[in-house]
Image (tube, rainbow, N blue to C red):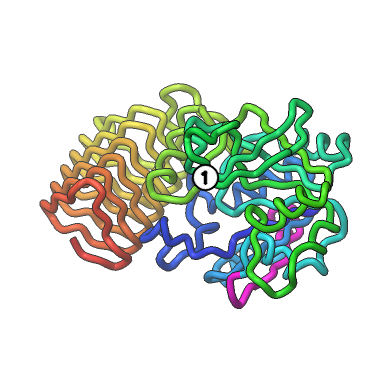
Amino acid sequence: MQAVILAGGQGTRLRPLTSNLPKPMIPLVNKPFLERMLAYLKAHGVTEVILALGYLPTAIQDAFGDGRGIGVRIIYSIEEAPLGTAGAVKHLERLIKGTFLVFNGDIVTDMDLTAMQRLHREKKSTATLFLVRVDDPTRFGVVETTGESRITRFTEKPKKEEVRANTINGGCYVLEPQVLTHVPPGEYHMFEKGLFPKLLEIGAPMHAYAPPCYWNDVGTPASYLRIHQDILEGRATLSDEGRLSPGEVRKGLNVRIAPNASLTGPVILGDGCTIEAGAQITGPAVIGRNCLVQRGARLANVVLWDGVIIGEEAVVEATSIAKGVTVGKRAILRGAVIGEGARISDGANLAPGATVQVGGIA
């Protein structure tokens, strides 16, 4: 089975985490997000992945090459200008060999992709859409279905009184290659507002797969932090990461923890980390490789990328910190997002929601 991953966006809502790094390369529990997605696809029978890229493509190409290192063949399709979700797939149509999958490149889910493919075959569907149930569908495009999973209507951001279903597009599709004949070549075109309504209009069989499962998108710093919480606390699972037991502290290689440091799981420590005397880490927390947490520092609900230094008696809570950042002594960060290589001064007190740009000083 082939899969197309749409990963050409600039990740602007995630900045400064994506200021000089494409979204597929940001760490998800200490591995590139794309690596996690490829492992998920491989676990469900995908053998070839076409990556539709636009922003900083060489960072991804250099990291994954032809995919042989992870057991999935990778082909690259580079957009010189944004073409939209359907336009990007039309751009690589020549590479499609048969029934194929499409994934938005910012989706985290543990839904049964094998069962979705089976439903597509059994229903002899032209397009099968993964749907997600939400509490407030007025913020999304709503997809209505019959009791037999046949899709009957698309409604974009309905008013409350117009809501007739709570299922929305989850950003994953099983498609037959002939659907691309309805996408104009070389033009900006979307699945959601262009191709799918067109298929419904002409009577093409379209079905929905809406299982109970985990779903979120890595779209904002808040959702990025929340996804880590959900993984560590067992609400979501990763194909290539064993589930943590309650209160577990999982350590990489060559981790040094002072005898009187305090770690309360779930916590994951990358290779080469050092946790000094009196430091406290309260999970959920993910600490990247070669990080240093100095004496008396207190961390809770954090994601630290590689090479971060947390100064003595600093307090860091509900915060994501990119690689190579130094947080000064007695600094206080609550609800912050810190870009790569930034420096937080001794005694700094950042307001909740504060961001520090790449290489910035606060």
- The secondary structure that dominates the magenta segment is loop
Does 65 lie within the magenta span? no
Q: Position of residue 205 (x, y in %)?
A: 83, 43
> Which quarter of the figure has residue 282?
top left
Extreme residue in the top direction = 246
Q: Nearer the viewer, residue 301 or 157?
A: 157
Query: Which residue is situated farthest in the front direction here?
Result: 161
Front position in the image: 244 or 127: 127
Q: Nearer the viewer, residue 48 or 82?
A: 82
Q: Secondary structure at mark 1?
A: loop
Highlighted range, magenta = 67-82
Relative height, residue 173 to residue 279 (above, below): below
Left or right of 289 in this view: 329: left
Q: In percent of the image, x 78 and y 56: which residue is there?
A: 48
Q: Is residue 46 visible?
A: no
Question: The C terminus is located in which quarter?
Answer: bottom left
Tell me where residue 289 appears, x and y as whole percent: 42, 50
- Residue 339 is left or right of residue 148, and the answer is left
Residue type at mark 1: give it: Lys
The residue labelled by disc 1 is 157
- Report the front residue among 6 and 90: 90
Which residue lies most toward the left here? 347
Position in image of residue 61 (x %, y %) = 62, 68
The residue lying at 36 percent from left, 60 percent from top is 16
Vertical position of residue 316 compared to residue 19: above or below: above
Question: Does residue 12 appear left or right of residue 336 in this picture?
Answer: right
* Residue at x 78% of width, y 62% of height: 182
Q: Residues within 10 Å of mark 1 (few under 14, many from 20)?
A: some
The image shows a total of numbered marks equal to 1
Q: Residue at x 49, y 30 (%)?
A: 135
Return the x and y of residue 45 as percentages of the image width and height.
79, 44
